[in-house]
Image: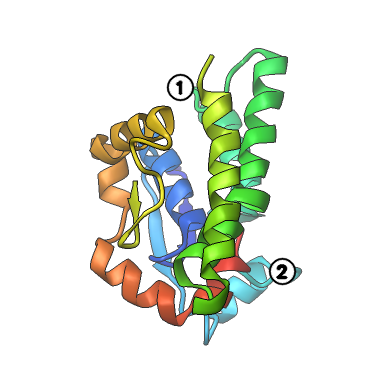
Amino acid sequence: MAEEVKLFGMWASPFSRRIEVALKLKGVQYEYIEEDLSNKSPSLLKHNPIHKQIPVLLHNGKPVAESLIIIEYIDETWKHNPILPTDPYEKAMARFWAKFVDEELLPALWKALVGEEKERETAIEEAHQQLKTLENELEDQEALGMNIIGEEKFPILHEWTQGLLDDAVFKQCVPPREKHVAYSRVHFDSLTAQK
C-alpha cells in the first residue's frame, strides 16, 4: 500500500515552503493542497481544529501541524537525507535557532518589509539586530525588494542566503519575487500568524 502524504499550505507562507523543501530533500512524493486563508477548507479545519492554520501535513490520514514539528516528523519518519543533526546538543541548537527565526527574526523582517511607513525605520533597525544575532551564530539578501541582508553588513548570512537561493530544490519551492511582494504588502497580518 502506497503512503498518502498531503500538505495543506499557502504559496506565500514561508512556513509552508519550508515543509515543501523538506519533503523534496527527502524525496517524498506528496499532494499539495493550496489553501485560501480567507476561506479555509473544511479539510484544513478538520485536520487542524486547534489553530486552524497552515501548514498541515497529512500522513496516512494522521495530521501533523506547526511547521517546526512537521520538519521533525518528516526527519524521523523518512530517515534518509537527514535534515536535523543526530547529535543531541546540535539538534537542540538547531531547534533553538529555528525557534529564534520564527519568533524573533521573521516578525521583525515582516514589520521592516511591509509594516507601517512611520514605523519602518525602527523595524529595520530591529530586523538588523536580529540578523546580526544570526550572523554572529553563523560565524563558527535581497528580500521583497529591500536589501535587508546586505553583503557588506551581513557577509556570512548573505553568502549563506545566496547558497540557499541557488539550490535547485529551494528554487522549486520559492514563489516568484514579484508575486510575493504584492501579496505580502496586502496580507501582512495573516502571514505573520502562520507557523
Q: Earlier in the sequence, mark 1 or mark 2?
A: 2
Closer-to-camera residue (161/175):
161
- The residue at which mark 1 appears reads as 80
Query: Alpha-carbon neighbours of circle 1 within 10 Å: few (<14), some, or many (≥20)?
Result: few
99 vs 79, left or right, is right
| Helix, strand or loop for disc 2 | loop
Closer-to-camera residue (40/131):
131
* Amino acid type for the residue under numbered disc 1: His
The picture places residue 15, in percent across and down from the top left corner, at 52, 55
161 vs 102, left or right, is left
* Circles 1, 2 touching at the beta carbon (< 8 Å): no
**Total number of numbered labels?**
2
Q: Is residue 125 above or below residue 9?
A: above
The picture places residue 58, in percent across and down from the top left corner, at 56, 55
Q: Given this view, does label 1 or label 2 mark the residue nearer the observer?
A: 2
The residue located at (67%, 43%) in the rendering is 99
| Helix, strand or loop for disc 1 | loop
The picture places residue 79, in percent across and down from the top left corner, at 52, 23
Please say whether residue 121 is visible from this viewpoint: yes
- The residue at which mark 2 appears reads as 51
Closer-to-camera residue (126/180):
126
* Amino acid type for the residue under numbered disc 2: His
* Numbered tag placed on residue 91 in the rendering: none
The residue located at (30%, 62%) in the rendering is 145
The picture places residue 147, in percent across and down from the top left corner, at 34, 53
The residue located at (33%, 70%) in the rendering is 181
Q: Tell me, what colour scheme is on the image? A: rainbow
